[in-house]
Image (cartoon, grey):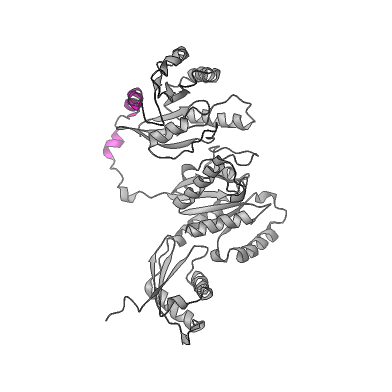
């Protein structure tokens, strides 16, 4: 991508709709409620053969720096610093407003190239109502309809010169160096940060990447979109996703919050490893366990981070108590890593990332069929399957059929008669004996003889 475009404007002019249109996917949340977007979101934009890095920003409002609106504006200003050109979006239906004029003056003072975009211009006479827009000193407005995909050809023409400017001249190093083969590039680890509202997820993310990349503050529920950030730790590429807080379903009333929670669930489904952040002052609440169960059901690797550890008066006793509670509350994730951290001070980040990499390794682990069947013979000798209909069940053969998460097929004489309690016993023994701590394990029962035995 040769250049970067930032979409800027007051709330509810259709910036996120335009972002989704240009990236070709519904990445940003869109709602009629003003101010849906709060954190900047990035993606790869396309118009025909033109490709560019695209930044969606929050609606600009004039507010004191210490308020939420002021912090949102600071985020937008940082986004503009990274851009080669800004799209100032106005609403063609409402016409020019004093807020539009105010921020047009601000953009002119920055010296950044600006393209004026008049969105919602579906009506033929929409531009006739925008005569004042020419007085902004930003050139002719580009009439578009982001919702219907109209007007993008003219936007293409206005962006094309920046693509030409962004093409780097070939250097001696460029000519001599060989492009890195696609197969040798390490695929980023997909890492999602989830939890209840106000447990410090965004503070933790900012501490990780070393900048105020996502909004934080005392107000609960600041994060609304799942924000993906390209990052690296210890030389390992990571795609870090900060998500909106998940409350109990019964407490979710507003449509926007339902959209945010759905976005978080989607982030979990597409993640490989998930860090569940809990509040050290209110750990292992019912909603924490519900979220942990959701992650397990989705088959993702999981690590538990207990945030705000700097506020705990007796850390050793608290850690011991939490581990005991986990063993009782989440037996299906026995051995899951529990890491005390502080997003405020930065303590515990190294152990947390080591736990993340260890969980990812378990999630991808493959065990040989020979080792599995030696284990199966030993486990039946130690604790045989129960008797069903007067006959003892026979567990004949086991093999691993998949990873991510570890998935096994167990062939039995009467799989339908195997009690659920014994299946849970097998999963627990497998987790303990085969070194699969904390990972979701799938054990599928199949009827028949050893399918790999020779006739």
Residue 452 left/right relative to 354: left
Figure quadrant of residue 206: top right
**Residue 248 visible from this viewpoint:** no
Residue 6 vertical placement versus 176 (above, below): above
Q: Is residue 166 magenta?
A: yes
Residue 241 vertical placement versus 434 (above, below): above
Q: Main secondary structure of the magenta part?
A: helix
Q: Is residue 433 magenta?
A: no
Residue 408 left/right relative to 347: left
Residue drawn at x 48%, y 46% is 240
Residue drawn at x 41%, y 17% is 127
Whole-percent x, y for residue 440 in the image: 49, 63
Quarter the N terminus occupies:
top left
Whole-percent x, y for residue 342 in the image: 62, 48
Whole-percent x, y for residue 448 in the image: 36, 78
Residue extending farthest to the bottom is: 390
Residue 29 vertical placement versus 150 (above, below): below
Quarter the C terminus occupies:
bottom left
Figure quadrant of residue 284: bottom right
Q: Which span is picked out in magenta?
A: 150-176
Residue extending farthest to the right is: 313
């Amino acid at each position: 991508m040769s250049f970067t475009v930032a979409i800027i404007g007051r709330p509810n002019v259709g910036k996120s709709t335009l972002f989704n249109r240009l990236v070709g996917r519904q990445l940003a949340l869109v709602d009629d409620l003003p101010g849906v977007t709060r954190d900047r979101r990035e993606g790869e934009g396309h118009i025909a053969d033109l490709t560019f890095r695209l930044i969606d920003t929050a609606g600009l409002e004039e507010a004191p720096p210490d308020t939420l609106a002021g912090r949102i504006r600071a985020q937008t200003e940082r986004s503009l610093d990274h851009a080669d050109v800004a799209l100032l979006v106005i609403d063609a239906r409402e016409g020019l407003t004093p807020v539009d004029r105010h921020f047009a003056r601000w953009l002119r003072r920055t010296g950044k190239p600006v393209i004026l975009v008049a969105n919602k211009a579906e009506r033929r006479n929409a531009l006739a109502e925008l005569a004042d827009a020419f007085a902004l000193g930003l050139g002719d407005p580009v009439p578009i309809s982001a919702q219907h995909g109209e007007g993008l050809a003219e936007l293409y023409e206005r962006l094309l010169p920046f693509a030409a400017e962004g093409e780097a001249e070939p250097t001696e190093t460029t000519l001599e160096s060989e492009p890195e083969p696609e197969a040798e590039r390490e695929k980023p680890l997909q890492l999602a940060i989830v939890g209840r509202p106000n447990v410090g997820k965004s503070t933790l993310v900012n501490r990780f990447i070393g900048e105020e990349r996502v909004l934080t503050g005392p107000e609960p529920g600041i994060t609304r979109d799942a924000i993906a950030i390209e990052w690296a730790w210890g030389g390992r590429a990571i795609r870090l996703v900060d998500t909106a807080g998940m409350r109990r379903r019964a407490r979710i009333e507003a449509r926007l919050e339902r959209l945010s929670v759905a976005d978080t669930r989607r982030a979990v489904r597409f993640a490989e490893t998930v860090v569940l952040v809990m509040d050290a002052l209110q750990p292992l609440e019912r909603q924490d366990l519900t979220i942990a169960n959701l992650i397990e059901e989705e088959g993702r690797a999981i690590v538990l981070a207990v945030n705000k550890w700097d506020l705990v008066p007796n850390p050793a006793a608290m850690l011991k108590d939490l581990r005991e509670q986990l063993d009782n509350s989440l037996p299906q994730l026995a051995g899951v890593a529990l890491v005390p951290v502080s997003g405020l001070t930065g303590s515990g980040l190294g152990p947390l990332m080591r736990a993340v990499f260890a969980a990812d390794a378990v999630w991808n682990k493959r065990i040989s069929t020979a080792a599995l069947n030696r284990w199966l013979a030993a486990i039946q000798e130690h604790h045989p399957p129960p008797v069903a209909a007067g006959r003892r069940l026979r567990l004949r053969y086991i093999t691993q059929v998949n990873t991510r998460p570890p998935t096994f097929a167990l062939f039995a004489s009467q799989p339908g008669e195997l009690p659920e309690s014994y299946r849970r016993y097998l999963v627990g023994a497998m987790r303990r004996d085969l070194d699969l701590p904390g990972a979701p394990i799938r054990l599928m029962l199949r009827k028949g003889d050893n399918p790999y035995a020779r006739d």
